[in-house]
Amino acid sequence: MKDLSYYLEKAQEIGFVEQIIHSVIYASGLPKVRPYELVVFEGGQVGQVISLSEDLVEILLLSKVNVRVGEKVARTETYLTVGVGEALLGKTVDALGNLISGRTPKTALSQRPLVTTPLGIGYRKNIDKSFETGVSIVDLAIPLGKGQRELVIGDRKSGKTLFLQQVVLTQAAKGTICIYASIAKRWFDTVSTAQFFRNYGVEKQVIMVVSGPAEAPGLVFMTPYTAMTIAEYFRDQGKDVLVVLDDMTAHAKYYREITLAARRFPGRSSYPGDIFFVHSRVLERAGNFVKGSITCLPVAETVFRDFSGYIQTNLMSMTDGHIFFDGDLFNQGRRPAINEFLSVTRVGLQAQTPLVRDINREITRFMLYFDKLRQYMHFGSELSQETRRAIALGERIVAFFDQAPDMIIPLNVSTIILAALWAGFWKEVDLTIMKNQMNSLLAYYLKDQNYQKKIEKMIAASNSLSALSALLKDQEKVISEAVGAPERG
């Protein structure tokens, strides 16, 4: 962006800073300025016009450096745009699209407006392709589809970010363009996330859009819009895109700070009345389109497992379901600490195969039954044989769903292991041995293409969990080939 003198000569208008309230600036002059137009201050700072009154122009500062009362301000006659293109892959940018890390792109980036109208119904289609996360409990119990908007919600430090990293790792390996928006996160956390992607060799499929807690509130506010604008570029190329917005509760707090400084009338919890609109116009830009898709995983933080808060319920109502990370389960040692009973997927099942849909029904029904049986576990030997068998199976399924944060389990492996558990494999085996053998099966599947084809053929031939379990009973060698002698009672 050029200096003040250039824009003064171009627009032939001048303004002066009259009042400063935190990041909101009031200036006089600029008679022909328009809403959302960019302005430049004498010190080189940039601002965006957010409202007009009879005498003053209200400007949101988009720079860290503060301005002073009496400084000159000039119109630019331009609006916020962000540079987009293939050259951004593997790079980290700020909320205005300026490069933070990575080499300067050799090819010029095309500019797109930051705020656009979401594509209409004529450009969209039903969600009909599954979206694999690499996390067994999600892929089987809370399955997602490409183009779905699924809220990731839970207490602070309950494993949400680790889960999101697993999802990015899984999708990047499949060729999906992944855009990770780190909104008002500590720089240590942002650098750790970027390092995670580098360590696993997927950084060339990832673009990080970051803003720190010390940034100007205006920059934090723009972060999810920048991420979605970049995603729309790749969608228009016909590609599948994953957008992670981590997190939207922090975004809401910074927007509240802006509106209170601008003396907007506060509503519930002091949030402005248009907070729902502010978030929905980001999330509405995701979806499954005739050309490409944008899958969006916004994040919301809860306090003491309470997800009935204002922002949390707002986000629930504008998404296609939510995955709830339970702090109590986390403290019990569950990883990931996902509460499948309080999680919802509204459109994900329609994108799954008949087999996965049947597994979802069976596993949901059984885990509810197992949860009720737990209260009788203290009776011990007085329990019936059938109840003991159900409890043992439930414990093994829970152990299987426990997954290390750096482990990615393909959907086919999750399906075959669950079917093997259902068929009675590992029934009499210690849980540690069972987990080791499951890990052996995963490693064997990943390195042996013939074994992959064999598993795929079995899964394709089965339309239900019972059918696949029966097939495994008849062909025990499929399991024993990968883990040694079959362990089935």
Image (cartoon, grey):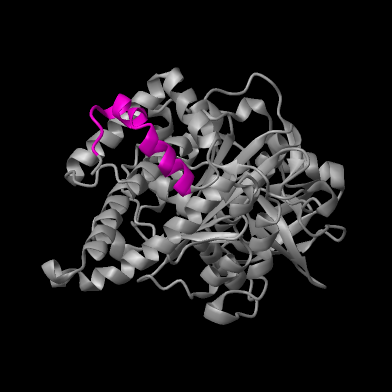
Is residue 113 found inside the magenta-colored segment of the image? no
Quadrant in which the N terminus appears: top right
User: Quarter of the image holding residue 479?
Assistant: top left
Choose between 181 and 342: the one closer to the eye.
342
In this rendering, position of residue 36 left or right of residue 200: right
Q: Where is residue 327 in the image (x, y as percent from the top left)?
A: 32, 63
Quadrant in which the C terminus appears: top left
Q: How many marks?
A: 0
Residue range corresponding to the magenta coloring: 465-487
Q: Which residue lies furthest to the front in this view?
A: 474
Q: Position of residue 470 (x, y in %)?
A: 42, 42
User: Quarter of the image holding residue 57?
Assistant: bottom right
In this rendering, position of residue 372 left or right of residue 302: left
42 is higher (above) or lower (below) than 315: above
Choose between 254 and 360: the one closer to the eye.
360
Residue 222 in sight here: no
Q: Where is residue 127 in the image (x, y as percent from the top left)?
A: 68, 49
Q: Main secondary structure of the magenta part?
A: helix
